[in-house]
Amino acid sequence: MINPLLQKRATRRRRLASSTGQSIVEVAIAMPILLGLVIGIFEFGRAWNVRQVTTNAAREGSRLAVIAGADPLVVEAEIDGRMSDAGLDPGLATITISGMACCIGLPVSVQLDYPFQFTFIGPIVDLLGGGGSIPGSITMTTTSTMRHE
């Protein structure tokens, strides 16, 4: 006959040596890190897309601005149209055109400032005490310069 005390000790040792909850703990530790990495990749990919759209819009605006007799309102409308085509709000953009009324051969610069709000990272930055007026937002600035034709 087996001693009940020894059997109880053996059962307790088996329970302590078991790893049934270990996997759950490992997933609970790794999952937030993995989700943060994936969300960060998507957020920075979206920011890069907005950066490319604003750069292309400024370039198209400067191409139009260097043509003789170009109107600043037409240039701004072209930039707004390019941004609208990409799904961005052109009302948030600040467009600065300089050197448009000058001589042939001199440069024309189109500067485009656009605020970008990180959708998922912004609230996380706010939780971590990032401060600032708008957490998780940046202003993307791009400038395109071409010479008058």
Image (spheres, rainbow, N blue to C red):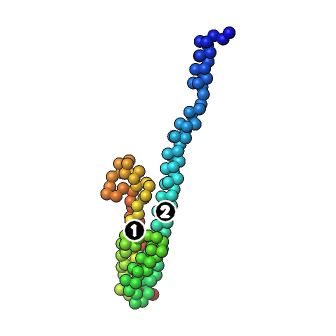
For the C terminus, the image quarter is bottom left
The residue positioned farthest toward the right in the image shown: 1
Q: CA distance from mark 1 to mark 2?
A: 14 Å
How many numbered marks have been drawn onto this rendered protein structure? 2
Q: Can you identify the residue that label 2 sits on? A: 46
Could you tell me which residue is drawn at 61 percent across and 18 percent down?
A: 10
Determine whether, in the image, residue 133 is placed left or right of residue 51.
Answer: left
Residue 144 at what x, y percent from top left? 44, 75
Which structural element holds mark 1?
A: strand
Residue 135 at what x, y percent from top left? 36, 56
Q: Can you identify the residue that label 1 sits on? A: 114
Q: Is residue 124 above or below residue 148?
A: above
Which structural element holds mark 2?
A: helix
Could you tell me which residue is drawn at 43 percent across and 58 percent down?
A: 119
At label 1, which amino acid type do we have? Tyr
Q: Does the rendering let one see residue 32?
A: yes
For the N terminus, the image quarter is top right
